[in-house]
Structure formats: structure tokens, C-alpha cells
Amino acid sequence: MKTAVSIPDEVLKEIERLARRVGRSRSEIITAALLEYVARHDPEEVTDAIDRVIAGVGDAHDAFSATAAHRILAETDW
């Protein structure tokens, strides 16, 4: 879908510079930027991203991490 938006000249120059440097079109750069903005500001997207990271890490426990966590919690002023 095409749409018309107003973008300040200095911002458009930066978009064009980046597009040339990475070999992508202005539309690709703007679309990627908007998708990133929406993902960062939509609470459901943020939660989904955190869930994906946690799922990737899994439930692996190791002695070092457990000991370090216990030590940090014991030394923390609540």
C-alpha cells in the first residue's frame, strides 16, 4: 500500500544515506524502522519478545549460576 507522509528534509537525508550504505531502498529502511518502533512500543510485542528469549534460554541450571544468584540475593538490601 502506498501512503503519503511528511518527513523533515534532514531525516530523509539520513534515510537516503543509510539506504545507500546498506544497499536497501528508502521504503525498506522506513518500513523496518516503523516495524521496530511498533514492536518496541506495543506491550504485547514486548511480552512476546521476552517470552521468545526465555523459551530460547530454557530451564538449564548450573551450579555457578545458582551460587552467584544466591550470593547476590543474600547481599542485596531489601
Image (tube, rainbow, N blue to C red):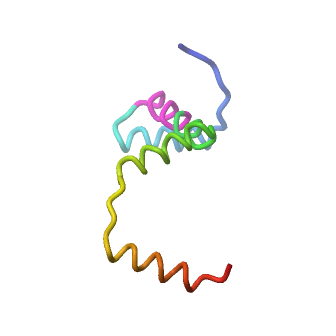
Residue at horizontal 56 percent and vertical 43 percent from the top: 46
Residue 77 sits inside the magenta stretch = no
Extreme-bottom residue of the structure: 75
In the image, taking residue 56 as reference, residue 75 lies left or right, namely right
17 lies above or below 26: below
Main SS category, magenta section: helix
Residue at horizontal 41 percent and vertical 30 percent from the top: 25
In the image, taking residue 9 as reference, residue 18 lies left or right, namely left
- Tell me where the magenta segment starts and ends, as one range: 25-34
Estimate the x, y position of residue 16 in percent, counting from the top left: 48, 38
Estimate the x, y position of residue 49 in percent, counting from the top left: 48, 43
Residue at horizontal 67 percent and vertical 28 percent from the top: 6
Extreme-top residue of the structure: 1
> Which is nearer the eye, 12 or 73?
73
> Which is nearer the eye, 34 or 27?
34
Estimate the x, y position of residue 8 in percent, counting from the top left: 66, 37
Estimate the x, y position of residue 17 in percent, counting from the top left: 46, 43
